[in-house]
């Protein structure tokens, strides 16, 4: 789940920023046979907020073009501690049938203005939460627990490895850990560790990994749980 802070007005003396809208799950898996998917949102704040939601390819803007999914309702008021479901519907525009497609559901929360505060001396900040929307066509039947076993990795440089994901789905890797000969754990740098389907990706470590032969891929499964998978050989 990605979270972005988005300023609505730029002033300097005080900040009112909250992150209270929580989705019921961290990802939506949309299968080809689904007529729709429903995601529940709960407002954990003690005040109402306005929620806008849309689907894009990661741009973070409702103006994104050629998106084959819509969310209903796109904008609404959510009372304090209330729960509301939004529907995600596929319009059946053509998508690849041999691999999974990735989109992002944006949940944009606008907090209320503080009463009694001069707007010229305050800043109103909204938060955009992005969760993965993964479309799986009928021909794609793999799940992350199966796909992760197909991943192979090889050392390209003293502090660089390349991993190959030959599977048909995205693997949401959140950490890569390599125990070095000295006993120190090296972690891959950067925040974007996702392995795309049928693709290779290089990862850089802060220090050399030496002759390490084992590594652990930490990934997120379809239910949003964090799972460790150990690769016993780095080629």
Image (tube, helix red, strand yellow):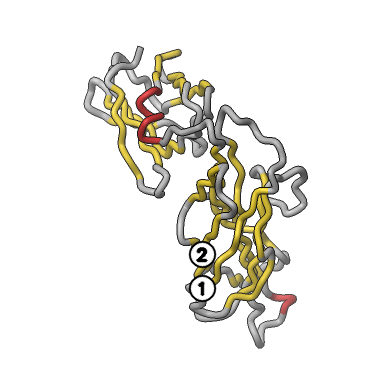
Task: Left or right? Give the position of 176 relative to 47.
Answer: left
Residue depicted at 40% across the width and 23% down the height: 151
Query: Residue 172: where, in percent of width, then height?
Result: 46, 38
Residue 143 or residue 64, whichever sits in front: 143
The image position of residue 180, as x and y in percent, is: 27, 23
Q: Image check: 100 left or right of 7?
A: left
Q: Quadrant of the C terminus?
A: top left
Whole-number angstrom distance, CA of label 1 to CA of label 2: 7 Å
* 46 vs 8, nearest the viewer: 46
Q: Where, by quadrant of the figure, is residue 14 drawn?
A: bottom right
Give the crowd class for mark 2: few <14, some 14-19, many >=20 residues within 10 Å: few
Q: Which residue is mark 2?
A: 40
Residue located 41% across and 29% down the image? 147
Q: Label 1: which residue? A: 83
Tag 2 secondary structure: strand
Tell me the tag on residue 35.
none
CA neighbours of label 1 inside 10 A, class few (<14), some (14 to 19), many (20+) = some
Q: Where does residue 150 sit, x and y in percent of width and height?
A: 39, 23
Displayed quadrant of residue 213: top left
78 or 186: nearer the eye? Answer: 78
Q: Is residue 32 left or right of residue 9?
A: left
Q: Position of residue 137 (x, y in %)?
A: 56, 36
Q: Residue at x 54, y 38 (%)?
A: 136
Label 1: element kind: strand
Depth check: give the residue in front, 35 or 176.
35
Vertical comparison of 49 with 198: above or below = below
* N-term-proximal mark, 1 vs 2: 2
Q: Quadrant of residue 118?
A: bottom right
Q: How many marks?
A: 2
231 w.r.t. 122: above or below? above
Taking the spot 66% from the left edge, 43% from the top edge, the residue there is 57
Proximity of marks 1 and 2: CB atoms separated by less than 8 Å: yes
């Amino acid at each position: 789940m990605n979270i972005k802070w988005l300023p609505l007005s730029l002033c300097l003396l005080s900040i009112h920023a909250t992150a209270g809208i929580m989705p019921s799950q961290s990802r939506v898996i949309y299968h080809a046979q689904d007529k729709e998917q429903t995601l529940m949102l709960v407002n954990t704040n003690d005040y109402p907020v306005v929620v806008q939601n849309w689907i894009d390819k990661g741009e973070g803007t409702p103006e994104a073009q050629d998106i084959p999914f819509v969310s209903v309702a796109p904008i609404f008021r959510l009372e304090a501690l209330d729960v509301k479901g939004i529907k995600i519907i596929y319009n059946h525009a053509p998508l690849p049938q041999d691999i999974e497609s990735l989109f992002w559901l944006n949940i944009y929360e606008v907090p209320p203005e503080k009463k009694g505060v001069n707007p010229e001396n305050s800043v109103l900040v909204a938060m955009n939460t992005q969760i993965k929307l993964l479309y799986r066509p009928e021909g794609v039947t793999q799940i992350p627990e199966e796909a992760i076993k197909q991943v192979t990795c090889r050392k390209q440089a003293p502090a660089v490895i390349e991993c190959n994901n030959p599977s048909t789905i995205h693997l949401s890797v959140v950490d890569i850990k390599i125990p070095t000969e000295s006993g120190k754990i090296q972690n891959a740098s950067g925040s974007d560790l996702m392995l795309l389907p049928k693709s290779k990706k290089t990862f850089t470590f802060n220090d050399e990994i030496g002759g390490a032969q084992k590594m652990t891929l930490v990934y997120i499964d379809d239910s949003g749980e964090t799972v460790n998978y150990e690769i016993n050989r780095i080629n």
